[in-house]
Image (spheres, rainbow, N blue to C red):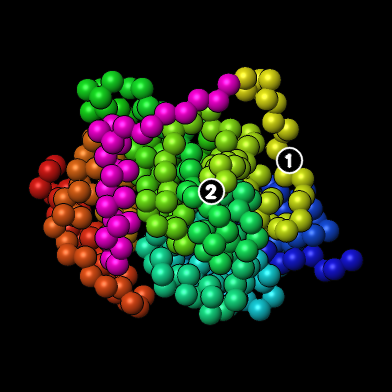
Amino acid sequence: MNRPQQITVLGATGSIGLSTLDVIARHPDRYQVFGVSGYSRLAELFAICVEHRPRVAVVPDERSASQLQADLHSAGLATEVWVGEQGLCQMASAPEVDAVMAAIVGAAGLRPTLAAVNAGKKILLANKEALVMTGDLFMQAVRRSGSVLLPIDSEHNAIFQCLPSDYARGLGAVGVRRILLTASGGPFRETPLAHLQDVTPDQACAHPNWSMGRKISVDSASMMNKGLELIEACWLFDAKPNQVEVVIHPQSVIHSLVDYVDGSVLAQLGNPDMRTPIANALAWPERIDSGVAPLDLFAVARLDFERPDEQRFPCLRLCREAAEAGNSAPAMLNAANEVAVAAFLEGRIRYPQIAQLIEDVLSNEPVVAVDELDAVFAADTQARLRAEQWLSRNN
Ligand code: NDP
Ligand code: MG
């Protein structure tokens, strides 16, 4: 029997992080937790250390480090505590580590994820924002280091499962006509447009099918999430934006489809539970139990499909435009969205203003080439600055 694989879970205290730890705990002979990180939920991070006994835990600052260190000491645990972004990068690239779950939310996950890529680790990519921001640079780094990049996003994991193993030859070369990216339509799919003005953060976060962190829940309500996923799909599968069609499928049972030139359409189905794509990526190319209940098609009974309405979901159009523009546009789109979603969650703006803020940033900031990481961070900073200016003007 081989030694257990050592796994680092970036963003262990989050929704994806906890689901990952759940799958890992089902297979102690295959996986051991090497490292975990938390940011604000430090009591949860301590509980994770007690349960999974990692070698390293990373916290954002020295004060939280002293607190966690003291708690670990009292519990008789030898987990080392490392600090900040540098600690995250070290934990993601440590020589002992075999695979890294990239599950920090937003741009904050970029450097640690890239550190894992550059160290040639197997990457389980949930942090879609990192790939959206850096696109080509990210994929170049993957090719240079020989990292194995496995998508965790349920749609991309579904597409990955429906593609042949040699899809890197090019979608055309393997007979793919287009990718059909499914979307639930979120909690506001049928809300009268006039009511969107008054929806609350809690309503936006009450997703009909998935239980997720608050940022991605708001992104799902606005369908920004689907737009980011469109860009993500373009990079992961070397697709053009017009080869990816978004299909609303309210039951979230089909997680995406691949349409081939011979008329075959392959789909991956399952209960909406992220432990399926996590288990798929962890064990790939093998299969392991994820703890997810078998799909009961008789209970599902029907599968519906709708075309997305861009008037209801303007973020989808903004994402398609950013995907077409390329260069710094996706990084600026992502940055503007992060500022807008945080402002919405804090009650500073109304829901329809999320798209208005992003549109303002994208139509006023020039798109520039990004051939190095510094250029991506400059575009990100510039977009956040303009987004903050928009917030001060509109509050
Ligand atoms: P959560 O908000 O539940 O978790 C986010 C994690 O990131 C937490 O561990 C959090 O720590 C940590 N974190 C937050 N801010 C920072 C920061 N500035 N620096 C370092 N760490 C930070 O999000 P999800 O688990 O839902 O999502 C994680 C990623 O996975 C996102 O990119 C999302 O788009 C993607 N994803 C999620 C899916 C889901 O079903 N949830 C599905 C597909 C993709 P703490 O909680 O301690 O503050
Ligand atoms: Mg998804």
Q: Residue at x 32, y 43 (%)?
A: 316
- The answer to whether residue 154 is visible is no
| Residue 257 coordinates in the image, percent (x, y) | 55, 43
Q: Mark 1 touching mark 2, by CB under 8 A?
A: no
Above or below residue 30? Residue 202 is above
In the depicted view, which residue is nearer to us: 341 or 167? 167
Name the amino acid, label 1.
Gly
Q: Where is residue 42 in the image (x, y as percent from the top left)?
A: 53, 53
* Span shown in magenta: 302-329
Q: Within 8 Å of ligand 1, the CB of disc 1? A: no
Is 384 located above or below residue 248 in the figure? Answer: below
The mark found on residue 244 in the picture is none
Question: 151 left or right of 288?
Answer: left
Task: State left or right for residue 22 relative to residue 189.
Answer: right
Q: Is mark 1 on a helix, strand or loop?
A: loop
Q: In which quarter of the image is the N terminus?
A: bottom right
Residue at the far front: name it: 262
Question: Residue drawn 16% across and 54% down?
Answer: 363
Q: Which of marks 1 and 2 is nearer the N terminus?
A: 2
Query: With 388 as the anchor, is 169 left or right in this view?
Result: right
Residue 41, x across and y down, in percent: 51, 50
Q: Going 62% across and 23% down the picture, which residue do you hit?
A: 300
Numbered mark located on residue 291 in the image: 1
Q: Is residue 317 magenta?
A: yes
**What residue does disc 2 label?**
261
Q: Is mark 2 on a helix, strand or loop?
A: loop
Marks 1 and 2, how far apart at CA: 36 Å
